[in-house]
Image (cartoon, rainbow, N blue to C red):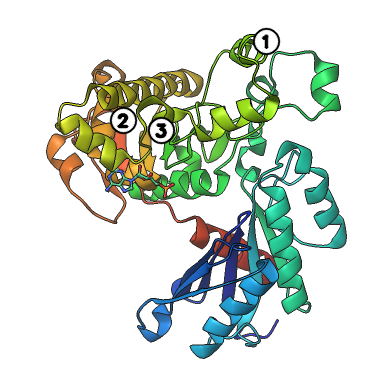
Amino acid sequence: MTANATRVLVLNSGSSSLKYQLLDMADGARLAVGLVERIGEETSRLAHTPLATGGTKREREEAIADHDAALQAVAQELGADGLGLDSPELAAIGHRVVHGGQKFTEPTVITDEVLAEIERLIPVAPLHNPANITGIRTAQALRPDLPQVAVFDTAFHTTMPESAARYAIDVETADAHRIRRYGFHGTSHAFVSRETARLLDKDPSEVNVIVLHLGNGASASAVRGGRCVDTSMGLTPLEGLVMGTRSGDLDPAVILHLSRNAGMSVDEIDSLLNKKSGLIGLCGDNDMREIRRRIDEGDEQAALAFDIYVHRLKKYIGAYYAVLGRVDAVAFTAGVGENAAPVREAAVAGLEELGLVVDAGLNAIRSGEARLISPEYARVAVAVVPTDEELEIATQTYALVSS
Ligand code: AMP
């Protein structure tokens, strides 16, 4: 790596999408951001914004057959802005990898062995790891000389004690099939818990934080002194909070009941719980903006969906309060957490005895900055902390390759 190689390309490959950001780690500046959607379909779409040159968003609609073609198209767009992937200033490519199992506790330079292990984890991440592997292979083909780093969604949660990570099922069966609670959104929980400590002017090792990552997918975590001690997602991202389209927690016997009595196949139940449940299953909408609009118009179904969402959230705040014993801050993040003041207000309502209070005026302020929304006298800080998974992936990638 040359001394002036300070750029990191962050790639987040989904089954039919490729999100990317190019960052300069000399100052953390975002040079370009973009997204390729509908890869493999008749018309794919590429949206690219060259922030470095102050350029506006460019969009292309054309057939992009696979991830290889998608990355080629991205490279072309970057090249047009003088940010080409052949640049000596590019230090590494950082890949978001969803499942790292128990093995990957840190960001890891990708070797053949590492790739083989990510492949071995496909049975526990059938939707995500294959797409991540495709992204890695594609990037390796384009720049075989460059370090490629995997940053795992599960890594931050590998510090969970066995008491939190194990399900209470037969140990031999669990071990034979790698069944345990891994947790996801780890990059976000790591970033937000650290930023919350910074907001409180404390070292992460000094604070206990409950992080509520509320996006379309949603998860909570209990972070003691910078280390995760519990999180709400489990073997897969299905467990825990009510999400946009996922049910979160339910009695496992619901699955048996659907299979035995409703005649549903495993794939149908999978689709029901992951894609047709949560907010969308409860009221037909998974966007919190739309749900709030409907509630304002007196829609009872939307109001009930909101109440179920908040009830589950409150249960997790209480549970993680008990797990941590002492809580310094509760941090809201991601699309809903950062933007939906009514969710924040309702989640904390009635928890004054626990030291949790939200100031209505502060909660109503819209801002892209990390901020406190609790009054000064409150025992527990309530914060809104915008997450930045790409910056976190780039930071971890750069730290690894420049050390
Ligand atoms: P994410 O997965 O973090 O991108 O979050 C996406 C979700 O955030 C959307 O489905 C919406 O429910 C929610 N969201 C985004 N913007 C707002 C907003 N201004 N108010 C309420 N909810 C929002």
Please tell me in which quadrant of the rendered image residue 369 appears. bottom left
What percent of the width, then of the height, locates residue 204? 47, 44
Q: Residue at x 71, y 27 (%)?
A: 180
Disc 2 within 8 angstroms of ligand 1 (CB): no
Bin the neighbour count of mark 1 within 10 Å (Cα to Cα): few under 14, some 14-19, many 20 and up.
few
Give the Cα separation between the discs numbered 2 and 1.
47 Å
Please tell me in which quadrant of the rendered image residue 272 appears. top right
Classify 162 as above or below 35: above
Sequence-wise, the earlier of marks 2 and 1 is 1
What percent of the width, then of the height, locates residue 245? 47, 35
What percent of the width, then of the height, locates residue 290? 27, 40
Sequence-wise, the earlier of marks 3 and 1 is 1
Label 2 SS: loop
Q: Residue furthest left?
A: 361
Numbered badge on residue 98: none
Q: At label 1, which amino acid type do we have?
A: Arg
Q: At label 3, which amino acid type do we have?
A: Ile
Left or right? Give the position of 27 relative to 336: right
Q: Which residue is mark 1?
A: 260
Classify 378 as above or below 258: below
Numbered badge on residue 380: 2
What percent of the width, then of the height, locates residue 340? 27, 40
Classify 173 as above or below 388: above
Sequence-wise, the earlier of marks 2 and 3 is 3
Q: Nearer the viewer, mark 3 or mark 1?
A: 1
Q: At label 2, which amino acid type do we have?
A: Val
Number of residue marks: 3
Q: Which residue is mark 3?
A: 280
